[in-house]
Image (cartoon, rainbow, N blue to C red):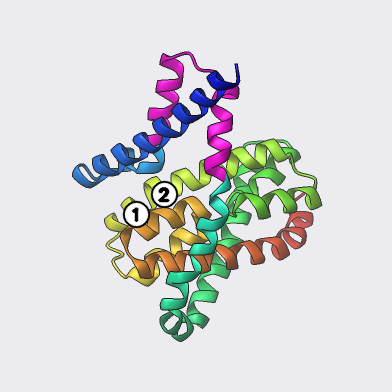
Amino acid sequence: MQRLEMLITIFSIVITLTAYILSRIAAGKYPSPLTSPVFLSTVMVISILLFLKIPYKDYAPGSDMMTYFLGPATVALAVPLYKQRKVISANFIPAFAGVLIGTVSTIISAVILAKIMNLSNSIIMSLTVKSITIPVASEVSKIIGADSVLVAAFVMITGMCGAMLGPWLMNILNIRDAFARGLAIGTIAHGIGTAEAAREGELQGAVSGAAMGLAAIITSVAIPAILPVFL
């Protein structure tokens, strides 16, 4: 039994890595929001699990092992951040202003749209933290009384949409500056978006990582002040 579980775990890791590698190849040959590695690899893994009728609880151990390395991967973002420290320092004031405006506006717009759609306060509170990384969003959700399950879902959806559509929209709007692209993606799409930004270049990845951290701090301070105004 233990041997079977180990084989399934190894198989889960293999199909996940294979799906990601294939999606990277597809994204290189056929650039499109639909071939974004985050989106395409997710679809591929889900399709394989459904086809082979492998329940998520059997896939989870392999997924947990890969999730464990998110910590070291996040810390590794400090390397490009250090290399690009002079550029980031030189543009800190406008960058801070951009992250501040972007973070506050995404919170307010989410609340207003949710109010227009007459959604419950639980959903509204969960939506306000959709643009920050899950560890921070989880802690903020406890403070404001949001639903942790909804928070996790909204954060993942926001990150995936940002990674898929962010670069594409900026290309359409002719936003080519590497600093601006990294700042926008990191502010809105946290870690998943930062991974996509890092694919574009070291500067984009470094700025996106810095914006992700700054957005998390601003959101943590802003939400308790903004929510009482609307709820």
In this view, the residue farthest toward the left is 29
Q: Which residues are magenta?
A: 40-67
Q: Looking at numbered disc 1 in the image, what kind of residue is underneath it? A: Pro
Residue at 62% across, 49% down:
134
Residue 47: say if magenta. Answer: yes
Residue at 32% across, 64% down:
201
Q: What is the C-alpha distance between the residues marked 2 and 1? A: 7 Å
Residue 84: give x, y in percent of width and height: 41, 77
* Residue 129 visible to the viewer: no
In the structure shown, which secondary structural element does the residue marked by tag 2 occupy? helix
In this view, the residue farthest toward the front is 3
Residue 118: say if magenta. Answer: no
Q: Looking at numbered disc 2 in the image, what kind of residue is underneath it? A: Ala
Which is nearer the eye, 127 or 66?
66
In the structure shown, which secondary structural element does the residue marked by tag 1 occupy? helix
Q: To which residue does mark 1 refer?
A: 167
Q: Looking at the image, is 13 positioned above or below residue 184?
A: above
Q: Which secondary structure class fits the magenta region best? A: helix
Residue at 57% across, 60% down:
105
Which is nearer the eye, 89 or 184?
89
Using the image, tell me which numbered label, if any, was put on residue 163: 2
Residue 151: give x, y in percent of width and height: 66, 42
Residue at 41% across, 15% down:
51
State yes or no: discs 2 and 1 in contact (Cβ < 8 Å). Answer: yes
Residue 8: give x, y in percent of width and height: 50, 23
Q: Looking at the image, is 21 positioned above or below residue 48?
A: below
Judged left or right of residue 55, residue 51 is left
Q: Residues within 10 Å of mark 1 (few under 14, many from 20)?
A: many
Judged left or right of residue 53, residue 216 is right
Which is nearer the eye, 198 or 63?
63
Q: Residues within 10 Å of mark 2 (few under 14, many from 20)?
A: many
